[in-house]
Image: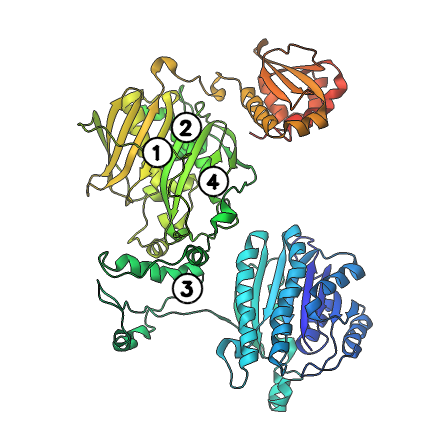
Amino acid sequence: MWSSGAIALEKVGHRAPAESSNLTVVFVSTGLGREYALAFAERGASVVVNDLGGNAKGGGKSSAAADKVVEEIRAKGGKAVANYDSVEDGEKLIQSALKEFGRIGECCVIYNGFLFVFQDLIHRIHLRGSFLVTRAAWDHMKKQKFGRIIMTTSAAGIYGNFGQSNYSAAKLGLLGLANTLAIEGSKHNIYCNTIAPVAGSRLTETVMPPDLVASLKPEYVAPLVLWLCHEQCQENGGLFEVGAGWVGKLRWERSQGQIMRQKSRPMTPEAVRDQWDKICDFTDATKPTTIQESLQASVSVLSRVDAGGQVEAPPSAAAAAAASGINPALAVGQKLPVSTFNFNHTQCILYALGVGMSTKDPDHLRFLYEGHPDFSCLPTFGVIPSQAAMMDGGLASIPGLNIDFTQVLHGEQYLEFYRPLPTSGIFWARLLPKALILICYNQFSVFVVGAGRFGGTRTSAKAKAPLPPPKRAPDAVVTDCTTRDQAALYRLSGDWNPLHIDPGFAAMGGFKAPILHGLCSFGFAARHVLKQFANNDPSRFKAIKVRFAKPVMPGQSLQTAMWKEGSRIHIECKVKETSDVVLSGAYVDLHQAAEASPEPPSQGGRLQSDLVFTEIGRRISEVGPELVKKVNAVFGWEITKEGKTAAQWTIDLKNGAGSLQKGPYGGKVDVTFTVADEDFMEVVQGKLNPQKAFFSGKLKVRGNIMLSQKLEVILKDYAKL
């Protein structure tokens, strides 16, 4: 008399809510479970009907109930098979689906339970049984990146009920389990919701009038379940009451509360008594939806109490880590997949406008007009691809980092260039969790308010340290006005954090209004240095380091003071209206004019193929032995430009752990390829088929031509820039 279900959806495109073909369902045979099974079977689902056939008190056992529903489904032309295992054997239920129908496909778990007399049995069936069935299906869901889980609680669990303490405890436990599964599963496209149905059943008919039982039909609950299981439904972590054809959503509500202590005065029961009406006043109540929002009230209290007051001892490292949702042990050392960032002159121009460039200054045209003879990309655009890699699921997907983005502050930023930025191309970014790009190197320092106290060091030897400016008058000072819409414009370059546009979201972070992006101020200061000390020549820009000290409000003026010390320009940026320092410990390193970096590839200087070979060399250093086993050959490359040999490379994947060297090989090369720089890039990017390049004369091969078949291993799999 309990039900649990693993629903497996075979994704066949977008289906209407009423369609559920290629669906495998496991359900109880009576009450709501029976109604669910019939509803899904009617829409083409394959159903595993699970029922021990026990009585209302959990005793007895029979296959009759499950067999009856199977016969009913088959009589209507549906697919069904009976299963008589306990939900405590959740793995067996999932295996029944695999054995009978050959696959699970996309998964969803529905768990429904009924009242039992003994507390131990209640918790075993309702709470533990639900956990075990879900655990059995969880890995299937993760592998196929789809899952829909429905837990069934009850009004007794939500509100409590006289004489049902054991049942209420188990049912509310299901809600807590569901909420955590919703958080953990979201990044795998696994959504979990909870329903509290009111429906007539074998149990409710003993405590409800017959006419009321008749009106509370299970068929009035099933449609909600079908919709919550559908791939188009994006609801996650919801709680719904449903019955008699009505559906309502529930949420937590919290009063504004009252601070009970001031300065050094202790908190007393009398203070609580005297403020009780305010504590319980739900005027302007908040509606927290996450543990971070729940903890925000306590964090806010700490920030508002006088620093000299009596503050309780901080929680232990383990308790603080658990409360913040952050587990450093899981996060440190995580590696994320390579991500790509496509850009062209449009993004370069938009970024330049976002950091205050204007056509009012003729010198800015080289960064704003793609037709300018010296059209260039501002160096600080280099933060954009790596930031996109971090923010577009990067930070959020790191195990152990359950971050509330209303509490995220950008602490420091370091950006170093290996060569000037092109004005178009594809960036491949790697997070370790810092971002690494062949063109440039980014180092982010991020602070999460209220997520500390979990131990560990406060600094890192790998972090670039900020440096104070010289103790003398600055050599130059530049003042620039931001506009009221500066943040709205800058965010179009890819920083979509609502903190910079949404007043409500900014208020949650403790700000009176949306603030300017720290990296926008960073861009303002960098271009001040570029103009003042490098004649707006981006090839002279080597590196920049800043510490973000205070926020800037859009519309305020930024004043950058600069001190020249050799090739290093120390900078300090203030808000002119308030004199608040917003960028501190900052500096820019410049190349000397005579040592300027070569022009970016897109402007005809350095070969584009150099980037590919640099990346191939890096990958050989990581997985060289594996490549040697796969390839077992030495490749020579002659890269031409305008008909002349411009570079030679040797890729040795035959000896030792493999190697890459620039120049001709000292020994015997198995095969040599000759190709123009631009054609080489076309092949690498998949725009030009190597065979077509060969037959058209664009790719010339000498030596063992059959080895050209291994080009894909070298270029496609391991030349991800």
Q: Could you give the CA–CA distance between mark 2 and mark 1, rounded to whole angstroms?
A: 14 Å
Instruction: Kindly give the residue lying farthest to the top in the view shown.
Output: 644
Element type where label 3 sits in the image? loop
Element type where label 2 sits in the image? strand
> Callout 2, which amino acid?
Glu
> Callout 4, which amino acid?
Ala
Q: Earlier in the sequence, mark 3 or mark 4?
A: 3
Q: Which residue is mark 3?
A: 288
Mark 1 is surrounded, within 10 Å at the Cα level, by few (under 14), some (14 to 19) or many (20 or more) other residues, namely: some
Q: Residue at x 35, y 30 (%)?
A: 544
Q: Could you give the CA–CA distance between mark 1 and mark 4, rounded to whole angstroms?
A: 24 Å
Mark 2 is surrounded, within 10 Å at the Cα level, by few (under 14), some (14 to 19) or many (20 or more) other residues, namely: many
Mark 3 is surrounded, within 10 Å at the Cα level, by few (under 14), some (14 to 19) or many (20 or more) other residues, namely: some
Q: Which residue is mark 4?
A: 388
Mark whose residue sits in front, 2 or 4 = 2
Residue 273 in the figure: left or right of residue 342: left
Element type where label 1 sits in the image? loop
Q: Which mark is residue 465?
A: 1
Marks 3,1: beta carbons within 8 A: no
Marks 2,4: beta carbons within 8 A: no
Is the C terminus in the top left, top right, bottom left or bottom right quadrant? top right
Q: Which residue is mark 2?
A: 416
Mark whose residue sits in front, 3 or 1 = 1
Asked if residue 40 can be seen in this view, the reply is: no
Picture coordinates of residue 671, whole percent (x, y): 71, 15
